[in-house]
Amino acid sequence: MKSHFKEEVGSYGFNGLLRIFNKYEIDHTNWITKEIDEERGGIEFQLPSAYGKIYLTWADFYRADITFVNTQKTFNDLCSLADIEHIIKLLEEQREKHVDSLRTMLMKMFKESEEE
């Protein structure tokens, strides 16, 4: 007989992270590369400035394992729910700044090419 316990537990952390994204109106499709079932579940993500994974541990803390692209520095620590919310908001701000800078650069390039 197949146990559904692992499936239910494995998605618990993922669903918790989705609630954080929804709470702050962050489009998680810009983040998530895949759902992971490590411990109680979470996400593996790729952003322009950082990549890594965030998952809920058996101790009800989130593990954030993040590598920052420009510096190659890593952050790997257990975090409370409030800390994870803060980290997600900061990473989303970095993502938005990067997207805005790309948008500005492209607009500038097309404007210059139209003037020529």
Image (spheres, rainbow, N blue to C red):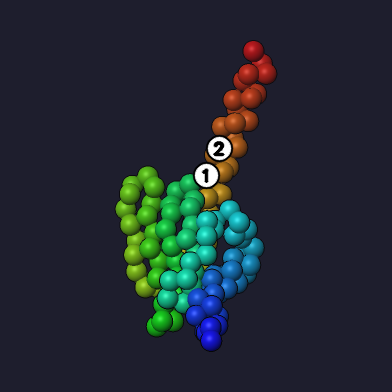
Please give the count of numbered marks on the rendered protein. 2
Residue 54 drawn above or below residue 11: above
**In the displayed structure, does residue 93 sit left or right of residue 39?**
right
Dot 1 lies on which element? helix
- Badge 1 vs badge 2, beta-carbon distance below 8 Å: yes
x and y percentages locating residue 69 in the rendered image: 39, 47
x and y percentages locating residue 76 in the rendered image: 34, 65
Residue that carries the numbered disc 1 in the rendered image: 98
Query: Which of the numbered marks, if any, corresponds to residue 102?
Result: 2
Q: Residue furthest right?
A: 114
Q: Residue placed at 52% from the left, 56% from the top?
A: 33
Q: Looking at the picture, tell me which residue is in the foreground, 82 or 18.
A: 18
- The part of the image, by quadrant, that contains residue 18 is bottom right
x and y percentages locating residue 12 in the rendered image: 54, 77
- Give the residue type at disc 1: His
Q: Residue furthest front?
A: 1
Label 1 crowd bin: few (<14), some (14–19), many (20+), radius 10 Å: some
Q: Residue furthest top?
A: 116
- The part of the image, by quadrant, that contains residue 28 is bottom right
Residue 75: in sight, yes or no?
Answer: yes
Dot 2 lies on which element? helix
